[in-house]
């Protein structure tokens, strides 16, 4: 398959980018040539404008050449049945018979609590209550700038079933480093099997989280009931006799 | 000019309530000081630089007093005494103290009159520095010209001050009137001001006096070229509010993010510390002619913009009242609010106009600061660009003062050069085609917009009445701002707060309180 413009397999893609050169006919040619090097044909540089001394911004439409066999694509789709607030509490009560304990924090120097708060705080996000509101959860939100050691210590102290790790700052891939360091620490203490560990953040997706050794990843727009559903299902799966 | 027909009596009453709330807090502030306030005094006296371990000399000096229990008297008097003893300038004296060549926690047998005379000299020369920066800025504004409001405000944040400089210049060429260099993540929690030019930071660039200087110089050059005065913005929040204000004043900064409650709520800084520090920082801003920007927009990132609109207005009123305590004049108050209502709500734009116009009318002489949508931005950049365009329209219609550029990639990454260009282009377009819309229309009497604004103001009235009765600190403890609870003795930085002793001396603060922004 190819990208779709208005006819199947026409391969049309819109691109916008900046080149570090003055705006000129030569710059437009350079934009066209560069896009051709990216494996495009029938390239139209529809817009070129100087946006700063020595920088030109382009909008380009072009037809992509490569074909992709969709059947060769693999992705770690999050396979969990989503339940609502009431259903989750009910299942925990009936099938687990005690509260599930969840500890959450934003680790490293990242000062953003927006992600972890959306999932953990009473209020939640977009009208979807946070874990603190669930009768089936005992939730501990440690806030931001928590060290990986503090988070793990807390999880051990309160016998957590789930750990939620949040990262918002992604400059220079700080989030990847922090996420990895936490999993390394958990592995060093040989505690990986003890917890369900979730990664969250605006630039997180499930594939990334699984690759880094987490059980699941939740990105932008994720709500508490999704994380809670995953935790409950995973818990039941782990403790299935 | 479209107006909301607000009840004059009610406007007067909310202002009086805010003043009464500020009076209560001020009663507390006057009895206390903090390590950061004392370090600021030393900075204003001319102490700069770091020791061989990178610790600022002002931190070393204040720690000496703290460890020998002499801090209750303040840093000023013993420092003046030590200077009399050394006969050297402030910087050399500080270095001698740190190198162990002379002690700082005793008066060296000097005559009281000599010490007081030295203090007077130090204060006088510090005030000259603050007055000079104000003069210099005024001259540059006259020379290059002041752009019309709303001022187009752009943030750069690469972590590297030299790269920031490139980004800032390109933003100015694309139309920006104000440039902020956002700080490195967690700088607000450092109990010292980093030193020197920096090229590494996370989520932003460290605020240092040298970085301020580098950026100011670059903006002066581009101001001349573009023939309009470009304002430089930084952040005087966190544990070093007053120290940053001092460094910023010395380097001709124009605007500082400075909120009387933001640090408490969003950075978990102790509330006593914040109240004490904000006062001194604002006294410095008042004298140096620095506009403060308050952070009410942040409330709406955690609370709902419809439900909690009144907390934004209430906080603006409290920030105004507390700023006036620190002698800031109305033209220096960039009180904050934001365009954050859920776009799924029918007539959300009408409510945004009601909120923005309410803020405009409550603070008619202030360059109020309007913040763009963030919470409801989508990763669909084209849709996000539409939200920003509507934000631009609300801003020009209600005649806002400082307008932060909304960015189409808000939900994705720190902006690329072309993202800022798109944003500035949209502002340029909307501000031009709708320039006089606000003065051409009227709001329907008792219509949707007027009623919404009145509804918010009524709630503000009730809320401020409750704060006035219970006290601001109690309401913050109860989590009534931004749904965040902060205990009065919790948070970071409380250990740096101390009660002033009978012998406490801070003559520069006394002068700033007495004289305000006047020369």
Image (cartoon, coloured by chain):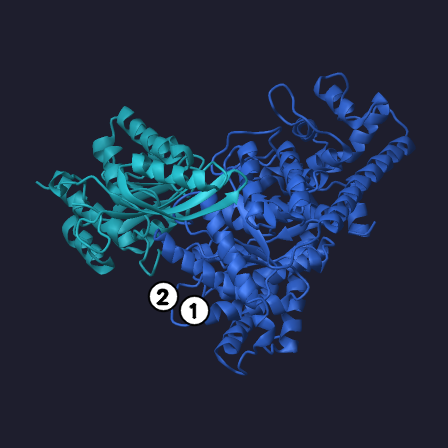
Chain colours: A cyan, B blue
- Callout 2 secondary element: loop
| Distance (Cα) linking label 1 and label 2 | 8 Å
Q: What number of labels is visible?
A: 2
Same-chain status of marks 1 and 2: yes
Measuring from the top left, give residue B437's x and y in whole percent. Answer: 56, 71
- Is residue A98 rendered to the left or right of residue A200? left
Q: Nearer the viewer, residue B125 or B487?
A: B125
- Contact flag, marks 1 and 2 (Cβ < 8 Å): yes
- Is residue B361 rendered to the left or right of residue B374? right
- Callout 1 secondary element: helix
**Dot 2 falls on which chain?**
B
Q: Residue at x 71, y 17 (%)?
A: B99
Q: Nearer the viewer, residue B406 or B105?
A: B406
Give the quarter of the figure containing the C terminus of chain A.
Answer: top left
Measuring from the top left, give residue B76's x and y in whole percent. Answer: 78, 35
Q: Residue furthest bottom?
A: B445
Task: Give the number of the disc on residue B344.
Answer: 2
Give the quarter of the figure containing the N terminus of chain A.
Answer: top left
* Residue B478 visible in this rendered orientation of the protein: no
Q: Nearer the viewer, residue B122 or B198?
A: B198
Q: Residue at x 48, y 42 (%)?
A: A23
Q: Is residue A185 above or below residue A79?
A: above
**Dot 1 falls on which chain?**
B
Task: Give the number of the disc on residue A59.
Answer: none
Q: Nearer the viewer, residue A16 or A125?
A: A16
What residue did someone put label 1 on? B348
> For residue A31, which quarter of the picture?
top left
> For residue B301, which quarter of the picture?
bottom left
Measuring from the top left, give residue A63's x and y in whole percent. Answer: 26, 45
Measuring from the top left, give residue B218's x and y in whole percent. Answer: 64, 37
């Amino acid at each position: 398959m190819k990208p779709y413009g208005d006819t199947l397999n026409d391969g049309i893609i819109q691109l916008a980018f900046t080149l570090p050169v003055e705006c000129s006919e030569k710059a437009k040619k350079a934009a066209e040539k560069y896009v051709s090097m990216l494996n495009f044909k029938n390239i139209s540089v529809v817009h070129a404008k100087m946006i700063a001394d020595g920088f030109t911004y382009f909008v380009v439409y072009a037809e992509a050449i490569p074909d992709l066999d969709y059947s060769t694509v693999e992705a770690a789709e999050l396979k969990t049945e989503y339940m609502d607030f009431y259903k989750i509490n009910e299942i925990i009560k009936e099938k687990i018979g005690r509260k599930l304990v969840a500890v959450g924090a934003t680790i490293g120097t990242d000062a953003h609590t927006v992600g972890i708060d959306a999932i953990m705080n009473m209020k939640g996000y977009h009208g979807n209550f946070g874990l603190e509101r669930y009768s089936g959860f005992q939730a501990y939100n440690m806030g931001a700038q928590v060290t990986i050691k503090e988070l793990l210590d807390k999880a051990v102290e309160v016998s957590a079933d789930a750990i939620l790790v949040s990262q918002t700052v992604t400059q220079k891939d700080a989030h990847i480093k922090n996420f990895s360091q936490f999993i390394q620490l958990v592995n060093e203490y040989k505690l990986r099997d003890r917890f369900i560990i979730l990664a969250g953040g605006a630039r997180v997706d499930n594939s990334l989280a699984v690759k880094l050794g987490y059980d699941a990843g939740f990105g932008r727009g994720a709500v508490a009931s999704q994380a809670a559903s995953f935790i409950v299902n995973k818990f039941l799966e782990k403790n299935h006799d | 000019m479209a107006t909301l027909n607000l009840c004059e009596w009610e406007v007067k009453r909310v202002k009086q309530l805010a003043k009464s709330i500020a009076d209560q807090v001020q009663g507390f502030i006057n009895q206390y000081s903090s390590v950061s306030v004392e370090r600021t005094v030393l900075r204003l006296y001319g102490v700069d630089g770091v020791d061989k371990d990178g610790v600022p000399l002002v931190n070393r000096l204040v720690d000496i007093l703290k460890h020998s229990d002499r801090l209750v008297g303040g840093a000023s008097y013993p420092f003046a005494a030590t200077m009399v003893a050394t006969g050297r300038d402030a910087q050399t004296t500080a270095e001698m103290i740190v190198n162990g060549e002379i002690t700082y926690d005793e008066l060296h047998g000097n005559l009281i009159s000599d010490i007081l005379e030295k203090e007077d000299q130090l204060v006088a020369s510090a005030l000259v520095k603050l007055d000079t920066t104000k003069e210099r800025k005024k001259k540059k504004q006259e020379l290059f010209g002041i752009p019309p409001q709303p001022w187009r405000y752009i943030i750069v944040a690469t972590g590297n001050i030299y790269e920031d400089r490139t980004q800032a210049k390109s933003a100015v060429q694309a139309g920006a009137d104000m440039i902020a260099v956002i700080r490195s993540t967690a700088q607000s929690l450092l109990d010292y001001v980093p030193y020197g030019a920096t090229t590494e930071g996370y989520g932003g660039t460290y605020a240092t006096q040298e970085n301020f200087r580098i950026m100011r110089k670059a903006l002066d050059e581009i101001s001349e070229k573009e023939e309009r005065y470009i304002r430089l913005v930084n952040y005087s929040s966190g544990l070093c509010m007053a120290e940053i204000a001092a460094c910023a004043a010395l380097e001709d900064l124009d605007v500082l993010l400075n909120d009387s409650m933001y640090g408490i709520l969003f950075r978990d800084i102790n509330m006593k510390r914040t109240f004490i520090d904000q006062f001194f920082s604002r006294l410095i801003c008042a004298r140096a002619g620095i506009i403060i920007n308050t952070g009410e927009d942040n409330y709406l990132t955690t609370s709902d913009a419809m439900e909690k609109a009144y907390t934004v207005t209430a906080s603006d009123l409290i920030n105004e009242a507390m700023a006036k305590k620190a002698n800031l004049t109305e033209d220096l108050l960039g009180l904050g609010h934001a365009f954050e209502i859920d776009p799924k709500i029918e007539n959300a734009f009408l409510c945004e106009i009601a909120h923005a116009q309410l803020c405009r009318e409550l603070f008619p002489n202030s360059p109020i600061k309007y913040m763009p949508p963030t919470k409801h931005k989508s990763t669909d950049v084209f849709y996000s660009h539409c939200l920003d365009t509507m934000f631009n329209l609300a801003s020009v219609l209600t005649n806002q003062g400082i307008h932060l550029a909304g960015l189409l990639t808000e939900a994705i990454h720190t902006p690329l050069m072309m993202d800022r260009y798109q944003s500035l282009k949209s502002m340029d377009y909307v501000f031009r085609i709708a320039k006089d819309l606000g003065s051409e229309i009227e709001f329907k009497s008792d219509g949707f917009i007027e009623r919404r604004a009145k509804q918010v103001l009524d709630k503000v009235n009730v809320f401020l009445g409750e704060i006035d009765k219970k006290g601001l600190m109690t309401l913050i403890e109860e989590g009534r701002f931004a749904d965040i609870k902060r205990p009065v003795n919790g948070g970071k930085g409380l250990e740096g707060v101390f009660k002033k002793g009978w012998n406490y001396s801070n003559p520069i603060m006394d002068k700033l309180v007495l004289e305000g922004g006047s020369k």
